[in-house]
Every structure is written in C-alpha cells, then in structure tokens.
Amino acid sequence: MAAALFMFAATAQAQLYVGGSLGLGTQSGKVKVAGKESDKASTFSFAFKPEVGFFVGDNLAIGARPMFAMVKENDHVSPTETIITTSTFGIEPFVDYYLAEFGDFRFLLEATVPFGYSKVKTKFGSTTTDGDPEISLGVNITPVIGYGLDDHWTLRAALNFMNVGFGMTKIKHDSDNFTSDVNFSFGANMDNVFTTGLLTVGAVFAF
C-alpha cells in the first residue's frame, strides 16, 4: 500500500514534505528498607518515526511513516535481575484530508493503516530467551490541528483522545498455535486531554 501511494504521488507531480518524531523516556528510582538501599524497577524507551508525504491537491496529502520502537525493563532484583526488551518495527501509510483553514490554522482528518512486528527478549542472569512474535494491523482516524509557522514549517497536533480505531493482533506460538485479539476504540475523554499519549505534537517541512 505504501509503495502504491508513492508511485501515485510521483506521477501526480506532488509537493514533497518531510517530518517525523523522536522520543526517549526513562523511569527509575531507589528504595531504602531497614537501612538498605536498592534500585527500583527501571524502564528505558526509545521511538523513532520519520515521515514522508506528498500534497496531491489543495486538500489532500498521502505518505508513510516507517517506525522503530524499543522498551527495556529491568527489575533490579538481586542477585539475579530480569531484563525484558521489546522491539517493534513497522510502517504506517496515511492519508490526510484538510477540512478547513482559519488564518494560520488548518484542521484535518488523518486516516492511517499501521502495521507492526514486535519481538520480546527476556534475560534472566546469563540466560536469554526469545518470546513469541506479535503482528499487529490497524485502521485509525484521528483529527489533527496544524499551525503554519511560515511557508515551509508547520506544527501539527494529533488529537488522539478523539481517535476512532480498529485493530488486530496475532501472537504466533508455533506453527500450529496462535493467539489473536480484535479491538475497536473511540477515545473521546475530554477530562484527560494532556495525559501522555492523548496529544501528539510534531512538525513537518514542505519543500
């Protein structure tokens, strides 16, 4: 699907733009019990999602976002700690339809079809085991607000708390066994607009 979008954009002599997001996160701490200090469980996360898109009309843009994410969790239990590392690779084709423009503000709906592949590794002492791979596929529609800083740069905020989504995941245990889940969500929760994950802010540069 992503290849078809780029072939269409190339033949339509569309305007190119680039963007993306980069995220880092850590969580750790210490606890002291009976005079003995030790590390609490810690988490490190990294996510990288570049974006390439094309304006194929006044109100329409298409593109894709390759994505990589990693989460590493350590329980710091002595004498043998457990480290769980989850790696995710994927791609997210998208279509943006611009609904209205007021001054420097633009309002649009974005439809995405994210596809991801995740793998978990668990290290206990000197022993490392591989978890079952997980494949995910979804369809999401999210309202977005854009603010034009100049002729090239635009800040964009995705209102994830108003997202409508459908997703499927499949965990393959072996050649004959798997676990699958299907979910539908509508996230209109105005009480938690600024909670992590409900508002995503990024930037794009149009050539």
Image: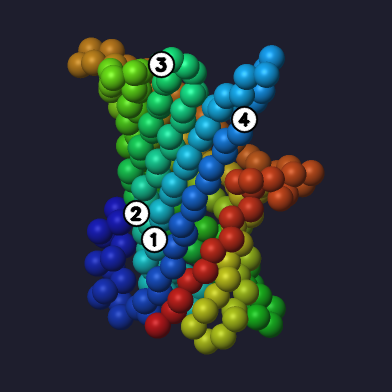
Query: Callout 4: few (<14), some (14-19), or many (20+) C-alpha neighbours within 10 Å?
Result: few
Q: CA distance from mark 1 to mark 4?
A: 35 Å
Query: Callout 2: few (<14), some (14-19), or many (20+) C-alpha neighbours within 10 Å?
Result: some
The quadrant of the image that shows the C terminus is bottom left
Which residue corresponds to the image point at 40% horizontal and 41% vertical from the top-left?
70
- Residue in front for this viewpoint, 30 or 147: 30
Amino acid type of the residue that numbered disc 1 sits on in the rendered structure: Pro
Q: Position of residue 134 (x, y in %)?
A: 34, 29
Q: Earlier in the sequence, mark 2 or mark 1?
A: 1
- The kind of secondary structure element at disc 4 is strand
User: Do the numbered discs 2 and 1 sit on residues whose CB atoms are within 8 Å?
Assistant: yes
Give the number of the disc on residue 80: 3
Q: Is residue 20 left or right of residue 10?
A: right
- The kind of secondary structure element at disc 3 is loop
Q: CA distance from mark 3 to mark 1?
A: 38 Å
Q: Earlier in the sequence, mark 3 or mark 2?
A: 2
The nearer-to-camera label among 4 and 2 is 4
- Residue in front for this viewpoint, 55 or 198: 198
Amino acid type of the residue that numbered disc 2 sits on in the rendered structure: Pro
Q: CA distance from mark 2 to mark 1?
A: 6 Å
Note whether residue 120 is visible: yes
The nearer-to-camera label among 1 and 4 is 4
Q: Is residue 197 above or below residue 183?
A: below
